[in-house]
Image: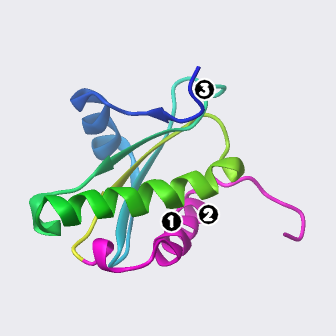
Amino acid sequence: MSRYVTIKENREFSRVYRRGKSFVSPLLVTYVIRSRDKNRPPRYGITTGKKVGNAVRRSRARRVIRASYDHLYPQLQNGWEMIFVARAKTPFVKSQNVEKTMKNHLKQAGVLMNRGSA
């Protein structure tokens, strides 16, 4: 089984959009919902609309979001599904900025594991 499980089907995206809780910032929009199976590894999906820019910018936005997710993955709890939506500023910032925003959103949602004093 793959380490990272992605959301691929439109009905799954729609369910997270409809029922999930959203967190908004100028760099990223995050939708989070509890999975039906609490022991399932965290799943994620990335959306980049045409407003983000041309294909090169949309690809960069996805790469930056994926890099941030990869870095935060060890801290994520099982049983969550999340969708990250790129904003117009996403392709123009460094992945550290997106990672900080993503970490804040996931912390607010209660997806990150509680670490001691780390």
Residue at the top extreme?
Answer: 1
Where disc 3 sits, the SS reads loop
Q: Is residue 23 above or below residue 72?
A: below
Q: Residue 63's quadrant in the figure?
A: bottom left
Q: CA distance from mark 2 to mark 3?
A: 19 Å
Residue at x-position 22% and y-position 31%: 10
Which numbered circle lies on residue 40?
A: 3
Q: What segment carries the magenta color?
A: 89-118
In this image, 48 relative to 31: left or right?
Answer: left
Q: Is residue 75 above or below residue 19?
A: below
Graded by Cα atoms within 10 Å as few (under 14), some (14 to 19) or many (20 or more), the crowding at tag 3 reads some
Q: CA distance from mark 2 to mark 1?
A: 8 Å
Estimate the x, y position of residue 104 in percent, counting from the top left: 56, 70
Estimate the x, y position of residue 85 in percent, counting from the top left: 30, 58
Graded by Cα atoms within 10 Å as few (under 14), some (14 to 19) or many (20 or more), the crowding at tag 1 reads many
| Residue that badge 2 annotates | 107
Which comes before the other along the chain, label 2 or label 3? Answer: 3
Q: Quadrant of the C terminus?
A: bottom right
Residue 59, magenta (yes or no): no
Can I make out residue 27 in this image?
yes
Residue at x-position 31% and y-position 63%: 61
Q: Is residue 1 above or below residue 11?
A: above
Which numbered circle lies on residue 58?
A: none
Q: Magenta span: helix, strand or loop, mainly?
A: helix
Three-letter amino acid code of the residue under disc 2: Lys
Residue at x-position 38% and y-position 33%: 7
Relative to the observer, which residue lies in front, 110 or 82? 82
